[in-house]
Amino acid sequence: MLVIFLLLIIGMVTVFTSSYVWAEYKYDDMFFFVKRQMLFAGIGVILMLLIMAFPYQIWMKYSKIILLGCFTLLILVLIPGIGMVRGGAQSWIGIGAFSIQPSEFAKLGLMMFLSMKLATKQKYITSFKKGFFPLLLLVFATFGMIMLQPDLGTGVVLILTCVVMIFVAGARISHFVGVGLLGIVAFVFLILSAPYRISRITAFLNPWEDPLGDGFQIIQSLYALGPGGLMGTGLGKSLQKYFYLPEPQTDFIFAILGEELGFLGGTFLLILFVILFWRGIKIALAAPDAFGRYLALGIVSMITLQVLINISVVIGLIPVTGITLPYLSYGGSSLTLTLCSSGILLSISKSANI
Protein backbone atom coordinates (compact mmCIF):
# COMPACT_ATOMS: atom_id res chain seq x y z
CA MET A 1 0.00 0.00 0.00
CA LEU A 2 2.89 2.35 0.78
CA VAL A 3 4.36 1.77 -2.70
CA ILE A 4 0.97 2.39 -4.31
CA PHE A 5 0.54 5.73 -2.53
CA LEU A 6 4.11 6.76 -3.37
CA LEU A 7 3.43 6.01 -7.05
CA LEU A 8 0.18 8.00 -6.91
CA ILE A 9 1.94 11.03 -5.39
CA ILE A 10 4.70 10.88 -8.00
CA GLY A 11 2.01 10.55 -10.65
CA MET A 12 0.08 13.61 -9.46
CA VAL A 13 3.19 15.76 -9.41
CA THR A 14 4.34 14.56 -12.83
CA VAL A 15 0.88 14.95 -14.40
CA PHE A 16 0.87 18.58 -13.24
CA THR A 17 4.43 19.42 -14.32
CA SER A 18 3.96 17.77 -17.71
CA SER A 19 0.51 19.16 -18.51
CA TYR A 20 0.14 22.69 -17.11
CA VAL A 21 1.52 24.39 -20.25
CA TRP A 22 -0.93 22.59 -22.56
CA ALA A 23 -3.78 22.92 -20.02
CA GLU A 24 -3.35 26.69 -19.73
CA TYR A 25 -3.16 27.08 -23.51
CA LYS A 26 -6.17 24.88 -24.34
CA TYR A 27 -8.44 25.27 -21.28
CA ASP A 28 -7.14 28.51 -19.71
CA ASP A 29 -6.62 26.50 -16.51
CA MET A 30 -3.14 25.21 -15.70
CA PHE A 31 -4.63 22.77 -13.16
CA PHE A 32 -7.18 21.25 -15.59
CA PHE A 33 -5.56 17.83 -15.99
CA VAL A 34 -4.23 17.43 -12.46
CA LYS A 35 -7.63 18.31 -10.94
CA ARG A 36 -9.31 15.60 -12.99
CA GLN A 37 -6.53 13.17 -12.17
CA MET A 38 -6.95 13.91 -8.45
CA LEU A 39 -10.68 13.22 -8.82
CA PHE A 40 -9.98 9.89 -10.55
CA ALA A 41 -7.37 9.02 -7.92
CA GLY A 42 -9.75 9.91 -5.08
CA ILE A 43 -12.49 7.70 -6.51
CA GLY A 44 -9.96 4.96 -7.22
CA VAL A 45 -8.49 5.03 -3.70
CA ILE A 46 -11.97 4.86 -2.12
CA LEU A 47 -12.83 1.89 -4.33
CA MET A 48 -9.48 0.28 -3.55
CA LEU A 49 -10.06 0.52 0.21
CA LEU A 50 -13.65 -0.75 -0.12
CA ILE A 51 -12.57 -3.68 -2.28
CA MET A 52 -9.74 -4.42 0.15
CA ALA A 53 -12.29 -4.75 2.99
CA PHE A 54 -14.30 -7.44 1.14
CA PRO A 55 -13.21 -11.10 1.04
CA TYR A 56 -11.68 -11.60 -2.40
CA GLN A 57 -13.58 -14.89 -2.82
CA ILE A 58 -16.68 -12.82 -3.70
CA TRP A 59 -15.15 -12.10 -7.15
CA MET A 60 -15.04 -15.83 -7.85
CA LYS A 61 -18.77 -16.09 -7.16
CA TYR A 62 -19.70 -13.23 -9.48
CA SER A 63 -16.94 -13.64 -12.12
CA LYS A 64 -19.39 -14.86 -14.80
CA ILE A 65 -21.72 -11.88 -14.31
CA ILE A 66 -18.78 -9.45 -14.28
CA LEU A 67 -17.36 -10.88 -17.52
CA LEU A 68 -20.79 -10.74 -19.15
CA GLY A 69 -21.07 -7.07 -18.13
CA CYS A 70 -17.64 -6.38 -19.63
CA PHE A 71 -18.65 -8.06 -22.90
CA THR A 72 -21.81 -5.94 -22.98
CA LEU A 73 -19.74 -2.76 -22.63
CA LEU A 74 -17.34 -3.96 -25.37
CA ILE A 75 -20.35 -4.34 -27.68
CA LEU A 76 -21.92 -1.01 -26.71
CA VAL A 77 -18.70 0.91 -27.38
CA LEU A 78 -18.84 -0.20 -31.03
CA ILE A 79 -22.33 1.25 -31.58
CA PRO A 80 -22.23 4.68 -33.30
CA GLY A 81 -23.60 7.36 -31.01
CA ILE A 82 -22.60 5.46 -27.89
CA GLY A 83 -18.92 4.83 -28.51
CA MET A 84 -16.61 7.86 -28.72
CA VAL A 85 -13.71 8.06 -31.18
CA ARG A 86 -10.36 9.36 -29.94
CA GLY A 87 -7.07 9.02 -31.74
CA GLY A 88 -8.68 6.87 -34.42
CA ALA A 89 -10.05 4.30 -31.95
CA GLN A 90 -13.69 3.94 -30.86
CA SER A 91 -12.77 2.86 -27.33
CA TRP A 92 -14.71 5.15 -24.98
CA ILE A 93 -18.28 5.49 -23.73
CA GLY A 94 -19.25 9.00 -22.67
CA ILE A 95 -20.94 9.51 -19.31
CA GLY A 96 -21.68 13.20 -18.81
CA ALA A 97 -18.42 15.16 -18.81
CA PHE A 98 -16.41 11.97 -18.35
CA SER A 99 -15.86 8.76 -20.27
CA ILE A 100 -14.94 5.16 -19.52
CA GLN A 101 -12.82 2.73 -21.52
CA PRO A 102 -14.51 -0.71 -21.45
CA SER A 103 -11.39 -2.55 -22.65
CA GLU A 104 -9.61 -1.59 -19.40
CA PHE A 105 -12.31 -3.20 -17.27
CA ALA A 106 -12.49 -6.20 -19.61
CA LYS A 107 -8.91 -7.06 -18.64
CA LEU A 108 -9.83 -7.38 -14.96
CA GLY A 109 -13.13 -9.13 -15.70
CA LEU A 110 -11.42 -11.73 -17.86
CA MET A 111 -8.72 -12.30 -15.22
CA MET A 112 -11.39 -12.98 -12.59
CA PHE A 113 -13.20 -15.49 -14.80
CA LEU A 114 -9.96 -17.12 -15.92
CA SER A 115 -8.80 -17.45 -12.29
CA MET A 116 -12.09 -19.12 -11.40
CA LYS A 117 -11.78 -21.58 -14.28
CA LEU A 118 -8.13 -22.37 -13.54
CA ALA A 119 -8.95 -22.92 -9.86
CA THR A 120 -11.91 -25.23 -10.48
CA LYS A 121 -10.80 -27.00 -13.69
CA GLN A 122 -7.02 -27.16 -13.26
CA LYS A 123 -6.94 -30.94 -13.71
CA TYR A 124 -7.96 -30.41 -17.34
CA ILE A 125 -5.32 -27.80 -18.15
CA THR A 126 -2.93 -30.34 -19.73
CA SER A 127 -5.70 -31.44 -22.09
CA PHE A 128 -5.85 -29.37 -25.26
CA LYS A 129 -9.52 -30.13 -25.92
CA LYS A 130 -10.96 -29.89 -22.39
CA GLY A 131 -8.72 -27.31 -20.76
CA PHE A 132 -6.26 -25.34 -22.88
CA PHE A 133 -8.29 -24.64 -26.03
CA PRO A 134 -11.57 -23.44 -24.38
CA LEU A 135 -9.68 -20.98 -22.20
CA LEU A 136 -7.59 -19.70 -25.10
CA LEU A 137 -10.72 -19.39 -27.25
CA LEU A 138 -12.28 -17.13 -24.61
CA VAL A 139 -9.12 -15.03 -24.41
CA PHE A 140 -8.94 -14.58 -28.19
CA ALA A 141 -12.67 -13.79 -28.36
CA THR A 142 -12.11 -10.94 -25.89
CA PHE A 143 -9.02 -9.85 -27.82
CA GLY A 144 -11.06 -9.83 -31.03
CA MET A 145 -13.73 -7.58 -29.51
CA ILE A 146 -11.03 -5.16 -28.35
CA MET A 147 -9.42 -5.19 -31.80
CA LEU A 148 -12.71 -4.10 -33.39
CA GLN A 149 -12.22 -0.69 -31.72
CA PRO A 150 -9.20 -1.09 -32.55
CA ASP A 151 -6.87 -1.09 -29.50
CA LEU A 152 -3.86 -3.31 -30.17
CA GLY A 153 -1.89 -2.18 -27.10
CA THR A 154 -4.59 -3.17 -24.59
CA GLY A 155 -5.19 -6.38 -26.52
CA VAL A 156 -1.52 -7.36 -26.33
CA VAL A 157 -1.43 -6.78 -22.55
CA LEU A 158 -4.58 -8.90 -22.20
CA ILE A 159 -3.14 -11.77 -24.25
CA LEU A 160 0.24 -11.77 -22.47
CA THR A 161 -1.32 -11.61 -18.99
CA CYS A 162 -3.65 -14.54 -19.71
CA VAL A 163 -0.81 -16.56 -21.28
CA VAL A 164 1.24 -16.11 -18.08
CA MET A 165 -1.71 -17.30 -15.96
CA ILE A 166 -2.42 -20.36 -18.14
CA PHE A 167 1.28 -21.25 -18.34
CA VAL A 168 1.74 -21.10 -14.56
CA ALA A 169 -1.41 -23.24 -14.15
CA GLY A 170 0.46 -26.08 -15.84
CA ALA A 171 -0.44 -25.96 -19.54
CA ARG A 172 1.86 -27.88 -21.84
CA ILE A 173 4.59 -25.95 -23.63
CA SER A 174 3.86 -27.90 -26.83
CA HIS A 175 0.36 -26.41 -26.87
CA PHE A 176 1.81 -22.89 -26.53
CA VAL A 177 4.29 -23.50 -29.35
CA GLY A 178 1.57 -24.54 -31.80
CA VAL A 179 -0.80 -21.71 -30.90
CA GLY A 180 2.13 -19.27 -30.68
CA LEU A 181 3.09 -19.87 -34.31
CA LEU A 182 -0.48 -19.18 -35.40
CA GLY A 183 -0.49 -16.12 -33.15
CA ILE A 184 2.64 -14.72 -34.80
CA VAL A 185 1.05 -15.11 -38.23
CA ALA A 186 -2.14 -13.40 -37.00
CA PHE A 187 -0.13 -10.62 -35.35
CA VAL A 188 1.78 -9.93 -38.59
CA PHE A 189 -1.54 -9.86 -40.47
CA LEU A 190 -2.97 -7.32 -37.96
CA ILE A 191 0.04 -5.08 -38.51
CA LEU A 192 -0.03 -5.36 -42.29
CA SER A 193 -3.80 -4.78 -42.43
CA ALA A 194 -3.52 -1.28 -40.94
CA PRO A 195 -1.25 1.31 -42.61
CA TYR A 196 -0.82 3.30 -39.37
CA ARG A 197 0.61 0.21 -37.64
CA ILE A 198 3.11 -0.26 -40.47
CA SER A 199 4.13 3.38 -40.13
CA ARG A 200 4.71 2.83 -36.40
CA ILE A 201 7.04 -0.06 -37.20
CA THR A 202 9.01 1.93 -39.77
CA ALA A 203 9.16 4.92 -37.40
CA PHE A 204 10.52 2.63 -34.69
CA LEU A 205 13.22 1.23 -36.98
CA ASN A 206 14.34 4.70 -38.12
CA PRO A 207 12.40 7.62 -36.59
CA TRP A 208 14.74 10.17 -38.22
CA GLU A 209 13.54 9.07 -41.66
CA ASP A 210 10.32 11.02 -40.98
CA PRO A 211 11.23 13.36 -38.07
CA LEU A 212 8.17 15.62 -38.49
CA GLY A 213 5.71 12.78 -39.08
CA ASP A 214 5.61 9.23 -37.74
CA GLY A 215 8.97 9.52 -36.01
CA PHE A 216 8.17 12.82 -34.27
CA GLN A 217 6.90 11.41 -30.95
CA ILE A 218 9.74 9.01 -30.25
CA ILE A 219 12.37 11.59 -31.28
CA GLN A 220 10.88 14.17 -28.90
CA SER A 221 10.80 11.53 -26.17
CA LEU A 222 14.51 10.83 -26.61
CA TYR A 223 15.19 14.59 -26.69
CA ALA A 224 13.51 14.76 -23.28
CA LEU A 225 15.45 11.89 -21.73
CA GLY A 226 18.84 12.92 -23.11
CA PRO A 227 19.19 16.35 -21.41
CA GLY A 228 17.87 14.84 -18.16
CA GLY A 229 21.26 13.32 -17.50
CA LEU A 230 21.95 12.00 -14.01
CA MET A 231 20.09 14.53 -11.85
CA GLY A 232 17.57 16.00 -14.31
CA THR A 233 16.88 19.59 -15.35
CA GLY A 234 14.83 20.19 -12.19
CA LEU A 235 11.19 19.67 -11.25
CA GLY A 236 8.96 21.76 -13.52
CA LYS A 237 11.82 22.74 -15.83
CA SER A 238 11.12 20.44 -18.76
CA LEU A 239 11.41 21.98 -22.21
CA GLN A 240 9.71 19.17 -24.14
CA LYS A 241 6.32 19.87 -22.54
CA TYR A 242 6.26 23.22 -24.38
CA PHE A 243 4.36 21.71 -27.34
CA TYR A 244 7.22 19.47 -28.50
CA LEU A 245 6.17 16.12 -27.00
CA PRO A 246 2.45 15.54 -27.83
CA GLU A 247 0.15 14.79 -24.86
CA PRO A 248 3.09 14.39 -22.45
CA GLN A 249 0.81 13.66 -19.47
CA THR A 250 -0.44 10.38 -20.97
CA ASP A 251 1.63 7.59 -22.57
CA PHE A 252 4.95 9.49 -22.55
CA ILE A 253 4.83 10.81 -18.98
CA PHE A 254 8.00 8.86 -18.14
CA ALA A 255 9.91 10.99 -20.67
CA ILE A 256 9.03 14.19 -18.77
CA LEU A 257 9.87 12.54 -15.45
CA GLY A 258 13.23 11.45 -16.87
CA GLU A 259 13.91 14.95 -18.20
CA GLU A 260 13.10 16.72 -14.93
CA LEU A 261 14.37 14.15 -12.40
CA GLY A 262 17.05 12.48 -14.47
CA PHE A 263 18.40 8.95 -14.37
CA LEU A 264 18.18 8.84 -10.57
CA GLY A 265 14.50 9.83 -10.57
CA GLY A 266 13.67 7.28 -13.25
CA THR A 267 15.61 4.59 -11.41
CA PHE A 268 13.77 5.35 -8.15
CA LEU A 269 10.46 4.94 -9.98
CA LEU A 270 11.56 1.61 -11.46
CA ILE A 271 12.64 0.41 -7.99
CA LEU A 272 9.13 1.13 -6.70
CA PHE A 273 7.66 -0.98 -9.52
CA VAL A 274 10.15 -3.78 -8.79
CA ILE A 275 9.07 -3.76 -5.13
CA LEU A 276 5.42 -3.84 -6.22
CA PHE A 277 6.15 -6.83 -8.47
CA TRP A 278 8.07 -8.63 -5.71
CA ARG A 279 5.32 -8.11 -3.13
CA GLY A 280 2.66 -9.12 -5.65
CA ILE A 281 4.44 -12.40 -6.39
CA LYS A 282 4.84 -13.07 -2.65
CA ILE A 283 1.11 -12.47 -2.18
CA ALA A 284 0.31 -14.86 -5.06
CA LEU A 285 2.56 -17.58 -3.63
CA ALA A 286 1.11 -17.21 -0.13
CA ALA A 287 -2.56 -16.97 -1.13
CA PRO A 288 -4.67 -19.54 0.78
CA ASP A 289 -6.46 -20.91 -2.30
CA ALA A 290 -5.95 -21.42 -6.03
CA PHE A 291 -8.34 -18.63 -7.06
CA GLY A 292 -6.41 -16.10 -4.98
CA ARG A 293 -3.09 -17.30 -6.38
CA TYR A 294 -4.14 -17.00 -10.00
CA LEU A 295 -5.92 -13.67 -9.55
CA ALA A 296 -2.96 -12.13 -7.69
CA LEU A 297 -0.60 -13.43 -10.38
CA GLY A 298 -2.82 -11.99 -13.12
CA ILE A 299 -3.01 -8.56 -11.50
CA VAL A 300 0.71 -8.22 -10.83
CA SER A 301 1.50 -9.57 -14.32
CA MET A 302 -0.85 -7.04 -15.95
CA ILE A 303 0.68 -4.09 -14.08
CA THR A 304 4.26 -5.25 -14.69
CA LEU A 305 3.68 -5.87 -18.40
CA GLN A 306 2.19 -2.39 -18.81
CA VAL A 307 5.20 -0.85 -17.07
CA LEU A 308 7.66 -2.78 -19.25
CA ILE A 309 5.82 -1.96 -22.49
CA ASN A 310 5.28 1.72 -21.67
CA ILE A 311 8.87 2.44 -20.65
CA SER A 312 10.23 0.37 -23.56
CA VAL A 313 8.24 2.61 -25.93
CA VAL A 314 9.46 5.80 -24.26
CA ILE A 315 13.14 4.83 -24.51
CA GLY A 316 12.75 3.55 -28.09
CA LEU A 317 13.04 -0.22 -27.56
CA ILE A 318 9.67 -1.11 -29.15
CA PRO A 319 7.15 0.69 -31.43
CA VAL A 320 4.51 3.03 -30.00
CA THR A 321 1.60 1.05 -28.52
CA GLY A 322 -0.59 3.55 -26.63
CA ILE A 323 -0.17 1.75 -23.28
CA THR A 324 -0.34 3.99 -20.21
CA LEU A 325 2.11 3.87 -17.28
CA PRO A 326 0.19 2.43 -14.27
CA TYR A 327 -0.52 4.87 -11.40
CA LEU A 328 1.19 7.76 -13.25
CA SER A 329 -0.33 8.41 -16.69
CA TYR A 330 -3.32 10.73 -16.97
CA GLY A 331 -6.53 8.79 -17.61
CA GLY A 332 -9.59 7.96 -15.54
CA SER A 333 -10.39 4.41 -16.67
CA SER A 334 -6.79 3.24 -16.52
CA LEU A 335 -6.10 4.72 -13.08
CA THR A 336 -9.42 3.57 -11.58
CA LEU A 337 -8.99 0.03 -12.96
CA THR A 338 -5.42 -0.17 -11.64
CA LEU A 339 -6.48 0.96 -8.16
CA CYS A 340 -9.43 -1.46 -8.11
CA SER A 341 -7.04 -4.25 -9.09
CA SER A 342 -4.70 -3.11 -6.32
CA GLY A 343 -7.60 -3.35 -3.85
CA ILE A 344 -8.12 -7.00 -4.81
CA LEU A 345 -4.39 -7.66 -4.42
CA LEU A 346 -4.46 -6.07 -0.95
CA SER A 347 -7.51 -8.14 -0.05
CA ILE A 348 -5.65 -11.33 -1.00
CA SER A 349 -2.64 -10.05 0.96
CA LYS A 350 -4.79 -9.82 4.12
CA SER A 351 -5.55 -13.53 3.83
CA ALA A 352 -2.03 -14.53 2.80
CA ASN A 353 0.44 -15.83 5.38
CA ILE A 354 3.27 -13.34 4.73
Image: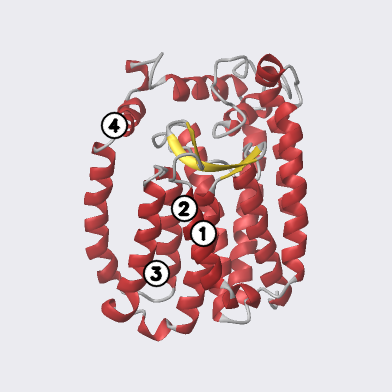
Report which residue position mark 4 lands on. 198
Pointer 1 residue? 70
Q: Identify the residue under disc 2.
A: 74
Q: Position of residue 251 (x, y in %)?
A: 54, 34
Q: Within the image, what quadrant is residue 21 found in?
A: top right
Q: Residues within 10 Å of mark 1 (few under 14, many from 20)?
A: many
Q: Residue furthest bottom?
A: 123
Q: Please tell me whether mark 1 sits on a helix, a strand or a loop.
A: helix
Q: Is residue 129 above or below residue 178?
A: below
Q: Is residue 214 left or right of residue 195?
A: right
Note whether residue 301 is visible: no
Report helix, strand or loop for mark 4.
helix
SS assignment at label 2: helix
Type of amino acid at the residue the image marks with label 3? Phe
Tag in front: 3 or 2: 2
In the picture of the structure, the residue carrying the numbered disc 3 is 167
